[in-house]
Image: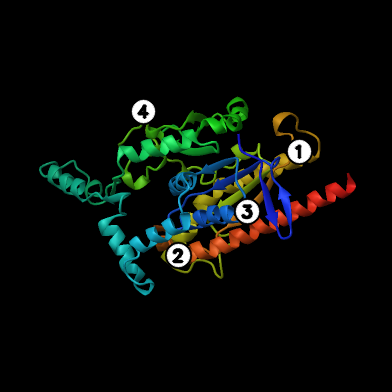
Amino acid sequence: MIEDLTTMVGDGHVDLSRRRIGFALGGMGGANAHGVAFLKASQHVGVKPRIISCTSGMIHWVAEYLRGKSLGDEMKAYIAALRVYPSQFNHLNLLRLMTRGLPTVFEPNHMKLAARLLESIGKPDTRLEDILFPADTLRPIKPASYFEDMAKVFNESETGILLNTFNPIFGIEYVHYNEAARDSVGYWERNGAPFTQYRPITPEMLRAALWLLNYGLEETFDGETLIDGVYHRQIILRELMGCDTVFIGRPLSVDWGDHIPRNAVEMETFKTKMLFSSSYYGELNFIFSHNQNVAAGRVTGELAHEVELQEVAIEKNIDFLGFFLENEDVYDTSFFKSKAIIRNWLAERAAAQAAEKVTA
């Protein structure tokens, strides 16, 4: 059970003990610093969620948050390890990542490429593109103990945790939950969409939840072809509708920017943003429609309340090449923005509670 929480706001305080708060954190390489900054800001201000949904890279950082690690220090150390060259030579950092991989996460699949070349000798039916441009260009290198430890952290946590995997063969999304999130998924197990199913968090499913497309689709998980669920739904939002307030750590900016795409890199950035935004806007529209139905008295039962959404979007777009490297400027900017948004929300809650006391 999550303890009662009273948070100071200015000279007063706001009681959050009866406020069900959720965090929905979307993962994206190069923008995970945004989600980490939001988590750090929430700690700094004193807001604790009852449930967190997380996808892709944010799964790792939510585990670190639950472990009580110093998130800011860890993120900045991680950034420093990747950015060997100064920012003006960032293309060299990217080249280093492509040729040497991401330490402790993945490495280039050079050996398999060489093996394919040797196997193709004397096989006229071998397609050239399968040899030169294989699907599995990277190889994951995290040990089994990493996923076992993470599963233990999640399953022993009093904070509800949701994360996802996706079966691209049958088009089925799996949302994985710990015991503290069981009540949150119960409604959706009974009334949800047929192409979303619910399963416990296990080490094997955590491995699948961090399986990038660049690893290929030959691997199976408990007999199924599964990949990182972020490719299907970047932000798990619908399942947090049992909350009164949901803070959304969105790793994409609200608008495009100063101009439409003018070159291939900008077009790839635009396409990536479109891909990851499509499911998110569907989730938002679902909740907006729900709130309208609640206001009209058309909803009964456990979800018969409006869901307040507080979006904390990254300040500006990261370009396509930047998706591969985290940035300390993103962390710093997102930390102060997140803290300001949470504090403003707390001030509004404090004012509302003060008004309730006056009218009581």
**Distance between the alpha carbons at the discs numbered 4 and 2:** 38 Å
Q: In the picture provided, is 75 more to the left or to the right than 293?
A: left
Vertical placement of residue 106 versus 203, above or below: below
> In the current view of this chain or complex, which residue is farthest to the left?
122
Colour option used:
rainbow
Label 3 – label 4 distance at C-alpha: 36 Å
In the picture of the structure, the residue carrying the numbered disc 4 is 222
The amino acid type, in three-letter code, at marker 4 is Asp
Q: Residue at x 58, y 31 (%)?
A: 185
Q: Nearer the viewer, residue 317 or 177?
A: 177
Residue 73 place in picture, x, y as percent = 44, 59
Which of label 1 and label 4 is nearer to you? Answer: 4
The reply to whether callout 2 and callout 1 are in contact (CB within 8 Å) is no
Figure quadrant of residue 307: top right
How far apart, in angstroms, are the residues tagged by discs 3 and 2? 21 Å
For the residues bearing labels 3 and 4, Cβ distance under 8 angstroms: no
Pick whichever of labels 3 and 2 is earlier in the sequence: 3
Query: The residue under label 1 is which amino acid type?
Result: Asn
Q: Residue at x 54, y 42 (%)?
A: 53
| Quadrant containing the N terminus in the rendered view | top right
Image disc number at residue 328: 2
Residue under numbered circle 1? 293
Separation (CA) of disc 1 from disc 4: 40 Å
Q: Residue 34 location in percent, x, y?
A: 51, 57
